[in-house]
Image (cartoon, rainbow, N blue to C red):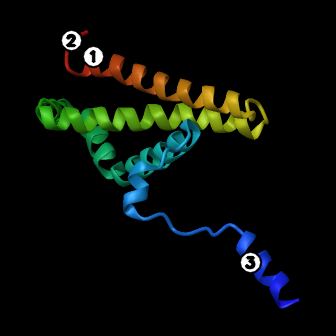
Amino acid sequence: MVEVQQDVKKQRQVYRNIGLAQLIKYRLPWAGKVSILHRISGAALFLLLPFILYLFDQSLASELSYLKFQAITSSVLIKLICLGLIWSFLHHFCAGIRYLLLDLEIGVEKSESNRSAIIVLIVGIALTAIVGLKLFGLY
């Protein structure tokens, strides 16, 4: 009977933590990538909320503060930070709509879920590009 238990133990799969070397080679499905980006974009929006509110306050308080707002946002570095925030918002919004549809059991099949994840990535990047063109004065 001891031998039978040893055979059963040999047949079980062993799950181990992924090391850093394997993490580089590990390929997430598109839905997993969108999920991780949704969390990152939400964290970025939360952590940079004081900066967002400061800029919003500067743009609305008075005419003088609006001029200060324009001076702050004329820097390329600040524009890149704003572009990152714009991507964070647009991606978080689009992925949130996708998750609401998944909660309603729309698009839960593997192929549909994969397709909707790719659509979220494309729409988020495309909308960010359009707003970015306006932000940098190219549109």
> Do tag 2 and tag 1 residues touch (Cβ < 8 Å)?
yes
Q: Residue at x 25, y 22 (%)?
A: 135
Left or right: where does residue 31 sit relative to residue 103? left
Dot 2 falls on a residue whose secondary structure is: loop
Viewer-closest of 78 and 59: 78
Provide residue 116's location: percent of width, then percent of height. Answer: 61, 27
Amino acid marked by disc 2 = Leu
Left or right: where does residue 11 sit relative to residue 34? right
> Do tag 3 and tag 1 residues touch (Cβ < 8 Å)?
no
Q: Residue at x 25, y 9 (%)?
A: 139
Amino acid marked by disc 3 = Lys
Q: Which mark is residue 138?
A: 2
Q: Which residue is mark 3?
A: 9
Provide residue 88's location: percent of width, then percent of height. Answer: 40, 38
How far apart are the alpha carbons under marks 3 and 2? 64 Å
Q: Residue at x 18, y 29 (%)?
A: 63
Q: Which residue is mark 1?
A: 134
Residue that extends furthest to the top in the rendered view of this protein: 139
Amino acid marked by disc 1 = Lys
Dot 1 falls on a residue whose secondary structure is: helix
122 is higher (above) or lower (below) than 95: above
How packed is label 3: few (under 14 Cα within 10 Å), some, or many (20 or more)? Answer: few
